[in-house]
Image: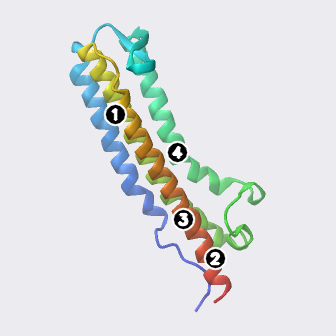
Amino acid sequence: MTNEPTTRRGSGAIRGPLLLTLVITIALMLRVALVWSELPETVASHFGAGGRPNDYMSKGPFFWFLTASVGGSVALVFAAAGMLKRLPARWLNIPNRDYWLATDERRDVAMDRIAAPMAWIGLLTAALLALAVELAIEANLEQTNFANDLFIVIMVAYLLLVVAITIRMIRDLAQLADSKDHA
């Protein structure tokens, strides 16, 4: 019996968060399509203190910009795990680095243990951005201020969840390697 760690998540662990992210993306696209004709031709594209609009754009370019920025942000989070697998070992800084990068098998397990939490962070990022877009849509449809108070609560919850996921990932990598070193 080998003492090598195995991944409890596997490389398929990103499928669930990725599918949920696609659902959020499709729902957001449907939402925009359903209200497109109701939106003014020039929409508030930026909101300042108190949620007051302070910059405007034509709705077409605004939603193309949102598509590119939201899609790009979420794609980057999901792609980062794959990019980590291709980085030289000297560029990786993970707990118990020498243990996890000692063999190709351990490196694969470590990358799987990083990919799964990153996928959940990608899902949370997609949800955060979709909620921000929804709040902007509502502000434009109702010709009111952006709901800053609600967005701040959502942002704090997002940040707390990202920190918790990151701490758990780091502790997981540190504890598993420590237990294998002492086995």
Residue type indicated by callout 2: Ala
Cα separation between marks 1 and 3: 33 Å
Name the N-terminal-most of marks 3 and 4.
4
Q: Is residue 109 visible?
A: no
- Disc 2, SS: helix
* Comes first in the chain, label 1 or label 3: 3
Q: Where is residue 142 in the image (x, y as percent from the top left)?
A: 23, 16
The residue wearing badge 2 is 177
Along the line of sight, the residue nearer the viewer: 74 or 15: 74
* Mark 3 touches mark 4? (CB < 8 Å): no
Question: In 3D space, how far apart are the residues under numbered discs 2 and 4 (Cα atoms)?
Answer: 25 Å
Instruction: Look at the image and tell me whether residue 110 can be seen.
Output: yes
Q: Which residue is rendered at x = 25% and y = 16% of the image?
A: 141
Q: What's under tag 3, amino acid-wise?
A: Arg
Residue lying farthest right? 90
> Which residue is rendered at x = 71% and y = 58% of the image?
93
Q: Distance between the residues labelled 2 and 3?
A: 12 Å
Q: What element carries label 4?
A: helix
Q: Do the residues labelled 2 and 3 touch (CB within 8 Å)?
A: no
Measuring from the top left, give residue 7's x and y in whole percent: 52, 72
Please give the residue where the numbered disc 4 appears in the rendered image: 77
Where does the image place residue 27, in percent across and percent down from the top left? 27, 36
For marks 1 and 4 on the same chain, the one whose residue lies earlier in the sequence: 4
